Image (tube, helix red, strand yellow):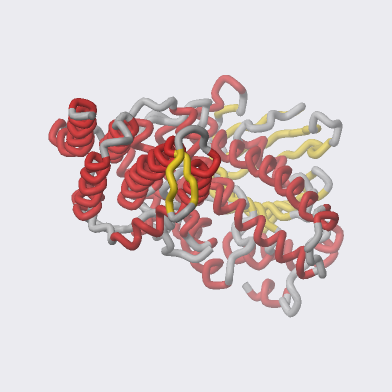
Amino acid sequence: MTPALEVEGVAFAYPDGHQALFGVSFRIQRGERVALLGPNGAGKTTLVLQCNGVLLPGAGRVAVTGLPVATEHLKEIRRRVGIVFQDPDDQLFMPTVAEDVAFGPANLGLRGAELETRVKAALAAVGMEEHAARPPHHLSFGQRRRVAVATVLAMEPDILILDEPSSNLDPASRRELAEIVTGLDVTILMVTHDLPYALQLCPRALVMNGGTITADGPTAELLADAELLAANRLELPFGFDPAVLRAR
Amino acid sequence: MGAGHAHPLYLPGTSPLHRARPQCKIAASLLFVLAVVATPRESFWAFGLYALALGAVAAVGRIPLAFLVRRLVIELPFLLFAVFLPFVGQGERVEVLGVPLAVGGLWGAWNIVAKGTLGVAASAIVAATTPVAELLRGLERLRLPTLLVTIAGFMVRYADVIADEVRRMRIARISRGHDPRWIWQARAVAASAGTLFIRSYERGERVYLAMVSRGYAGSMPVLEDQGATRAQWLAALCLPAVAALVAVTAWGVRP
């Protein structure tokens, strides 16, 4: 079966010479929910931007459901890969929520009733239908994050990439978002250093540090490995018992 | 940022004026202002009629007079300038309560006050009955270049975000004992302004990145176009038509 996302030996250096990725390889199958864990500066965001061709690898290759990420099919790649960025204020820029959700599919050429159906379905998926006509800056932070997810869902991506989805959310919004994410029928790569959230949502995790993948396995096993976590500057929150993980 | 608050210029409602297409309202108010400006300043009665006509429109939009008057406050700096004219004007003078005032200056001041107030009132009515997003769409319908409308849209969208950032930076500054009272203490404020510029610039880059990731390729998609029917245009153009008639008559009967 063609993997939803295939990353093979990807290396990348920024124009200023800073090398961020040193040969990263992994595969994500259709329908998987995978967490990408790693400390700040591990190269997680750089890797994410490789997946939709905003950055192109210096070496190696990235393919999304079989289609290689390359300049000639960027449009299709960006339809297949939906990225929800960390700050919803960066993502939501149109005057109303509905227009913002329509922005992506409209760029894909959808118009009229078809576009409207997409927008409604995406807003319904995150429980924000009744806010369609409101300006994004009148929403709470949690609501804005949900709308940001909807803007990407409206493009019906093959793989959804969430960059630090739980950051700045209060516990209730965090739980609501988790419920939405688990209810989605889409392949998900979730970038985070919120380890309990990764455990809750993603059966599998990749650990990244210093521009390489240092571990790949079931999330519960990786989080129970104190040495592995310490070696990668990852820490469970105070009072979080790894024994709970083994019991799962 | 709390939920539910609207733009301070907007007065939510469902009046016929609220339901009118934005492009009609913008065009009508612009034409109205042109008619007002073209009216000879000696025709006091004409300005009275304009004010009455605007009052009628405001009534249709169910805008309370007090709300409209408060919106007119923005005009004050210009009026202040007008007040000086009779004192500094040259030429023929009249005595008012013992103060010699220039006749030309008085006419000039009246001209600014009357026409300015009517113009501001007209735009305040449009703003009170049209949400900002609609205004932008109206401008687009009126064939204002899409790039300008897009920039205006970004400005509206991010004004609050940046104002919020300014507020947070200010609170962080005064929380560390900064209490600027004198001009030589402005350094920290200036540094904040610089930081704000860099942050906004970086945000611009991130916004662009997020747009590109959703398939943006240099031009905004044109979404469904809500055109106005002929009847809507006719209704909207009533006001400027009346105003044009008044202006033409004023020139005709001018002494």
In the displayed structure image, the side of residue B145 where residue A114 appears, left or right: left
In the displayed structure image, the side of residue A194 where residue B108 appears, left or right: left
Q: Nearer the viewer, residue B40 or A4?
A: B40
**Relative height, residue A248 to residue A82 (above, below):** below
**Residue that appears at 60% across and 44% down:** A28
Image spot of residue B197 (x, y percent): 71, 44
Residue A178 makes an appearance in the image: no
Q: Nearer the viewer, residue B188 or B250?
A: B250
View extreme (bottom): residue: A239
**Residue that appears at 67% across and 72% down:** A245
**Relative height, residue A10 to residue A235 (above, below):** above
Q: Quarter of the image holding residue B141?
A: top left
In the displayed structure image, the side of residue B106 where residue B128 appears, left or right: left
Q: Nearer the viewer, residue A69 or A65?
A: A69
Q: Quarter of the image holding residue B134?
A: top left
**Relative height, residue A10 to residue B98 (above, below):** above
Q: Nearer the viewer, residue A84 or B238?
A: B238
**Residue that appears at 55% across and 46% down:** A91
* Image quadrant containing the C terminus of chain B: top left
Image spot of residue A180 (x, y percent): 47, 60
Residue A151 makes an appearance in the image: yes
Q: Quarter of the image holding residue B133?
A: top left
**Residue that appears at 23% across and 58% down:** B62
